């Protein structure tokens, strides 16, 4: 049975109703919970997979609301409560493949200050088949950095598979710090998720783009990271100008999804949906082309929805694909 444990930070997100912010004029904000690993777990849980989220929340109303949020999405919370705070971030969603503007207020959060001991990790992962982590968590504090390394080491010793999204965040740490961390864990990763630009930047690798070939940079990045780290399964989101797509490497071959042009509402969390949709297809033993077609469609439709967590139904994904490709 598939049993996925995610380790990461759940935060409170504030987004102005009328962006961008204008001087000192007070505005209304949309507020919701989000976090890379929890976003993916919520999607997977909606497909019937058993998911647990390991994190730390403050011992107050926000912490209890955060726990309730996970439970409402059928994700089992494994939470440590303390006297610190919940991380917060403010966003203005990016349009037309432009990056979203994000301001973090997460220093000294409960998650960043909680050190996991090996006995707790061993207890939690006892029945786990896969561990889901991202490159955001180790950038938050030395405690989180060491926690990730301990989780990976113990998981690999027990034959548990590692799902990892590099998720480089320049506001959290430098490219060199990110590179050094990835050099420590990528040889232990079973399922890697990223994109060509991130891999090129983190490893200072010049991509080989071929004229008028939409996927050429992505295919080159896949070949580069596979040769360097021998990772058996690689999922890649693709953004070229206004177009969205996805690619998958498995069994020594590359499979390409459809490309989409959508009216982008909010791109935050779309990559997390891509990861989760890809893993859902893998867990269901779909063929590789079906997996990447499904996850690419889920990735694209997520750009048309507001919020970090997008638990999209399979029929919505299929209808979106059919309607988009028929135009």
Image (cartoon, rainbow, N blue to C red):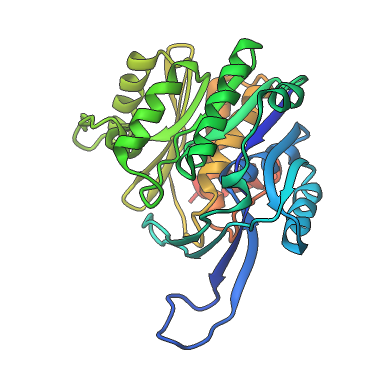
Asked whether residue 164 is in view, the answer is: yes
Q: Position of residue 251 (x, y in %)?
A: 48, 12
Q: Does residue 289 appear left or right of residue 256 in this picture?
A: right
Q: Is residue 194 above or below residue 156?
A: below
Picture residue at 55% right of the left edge, 50% below the top: 301
Q: Check the image and name the residue furthest to the bottom.
A: 25
Q: Position of residue 294 (x, y in %)?
A: 58, 35
Picture residue at 40% right of the left edge, 41% below the top: 168
Asked whether residue 326 is in view, the answer is: no
Most foreground residue, 215 or 31: 31
Most foreground residue, 213 or 60: 60
Q: Quadrant of residue 121?
A: top right
Most foreground residue, 310 or 54: 54
Q: Position of residue 195 (x, y in %)?
A: 39, 36
Q: Is residue 149 above or below residue 65?
A: above
Q: Does residue 141 appear left or right of residue 14 in this picture?
A: left
Picture residue at 67% right of the left edge, 42% below the top: 55
Q: Is residue 24 above or below residue 256?
A: below
Picture residue at 47% right of the left edge, 37% below the top: 135
Q: Position of residue 224 (x, y in %)?
A: 30, 21
Q: Is residue 274 above or below residue 250?
A: below
Most foreground residue, 101 or 291: 101
Q: Quadrant of residue 226?
A: top left
Q: Considering the image in quadrants, where does the N terminus appear? A: top right
Number of numbered callouts drawn? 0
Q: Does residue 197 appear left or right of residue 117 in this picture?
A: left
């Amino acid at each position: 049975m598939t049993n996925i444990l995610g380790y990461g930070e759940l935060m409170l997100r504030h987004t102005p109703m009328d962006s961008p912010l204008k001087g000192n004029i007070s505005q209304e904000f949309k507020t919701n919970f989000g976090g890379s690993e929890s976003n993916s777990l919520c999607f997977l849980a909606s497909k019937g997979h058993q998911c647990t989220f390991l994190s730390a929340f403050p011992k107050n109303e926000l912490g209890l609301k955060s726990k309730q949020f996970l439970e409402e999405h059928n994700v089992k919370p494994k939470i440590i409560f303390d006297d610190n705070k919940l991380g917060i971030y403010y966003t203005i969603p990016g349009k037309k493949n432009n990056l979203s503007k994000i301001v973090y207020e997460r220093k000294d959060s409960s998650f960043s200050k909680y050190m996991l001991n090996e006995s707790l990790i061993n207890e939690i992962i006892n029945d786990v088949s896969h561990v889901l982590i991202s490159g955001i968590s180790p950038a938050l504090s030395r405690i989180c950095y060491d926690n990730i390394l301990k989780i990976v080491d113990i998981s690999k010793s027990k034959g548990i598979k590692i799902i990892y999204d590099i998720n480089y965040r320049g506001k959290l740490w430098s490219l060199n710090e990110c590179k050094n961390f990835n050099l420590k864990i990528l040889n232990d990763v079973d399922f890697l998720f990223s994109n060509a630009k991130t891999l090129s930047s983190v490893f200072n690798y010049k991509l080989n783009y071929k004229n008028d070939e939409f996927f050429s940079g992505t295919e080159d990045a896949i070949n580069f990271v596979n040769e360097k780290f021998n990772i058996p399964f690689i999922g890649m989101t693709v953004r070229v100008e206004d177009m969205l797509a996805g690619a998958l490497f498995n069994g020594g071959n590359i499979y390409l999804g459809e490309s989409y042009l959508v009216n982008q509402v909010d791109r935050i969390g779309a990559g997390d949906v891509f990861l989760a949709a890809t893993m859902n297809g893998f867990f269901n033993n779909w063929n590789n082309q079906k997996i990447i077609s499904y996850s690419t469609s889920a990735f694209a439709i997520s750009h048309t929805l507001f919020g970090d967590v997008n638990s999209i139904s399979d029929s919505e994904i299929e209808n979106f694909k059919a309607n988009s490709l028929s135009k």
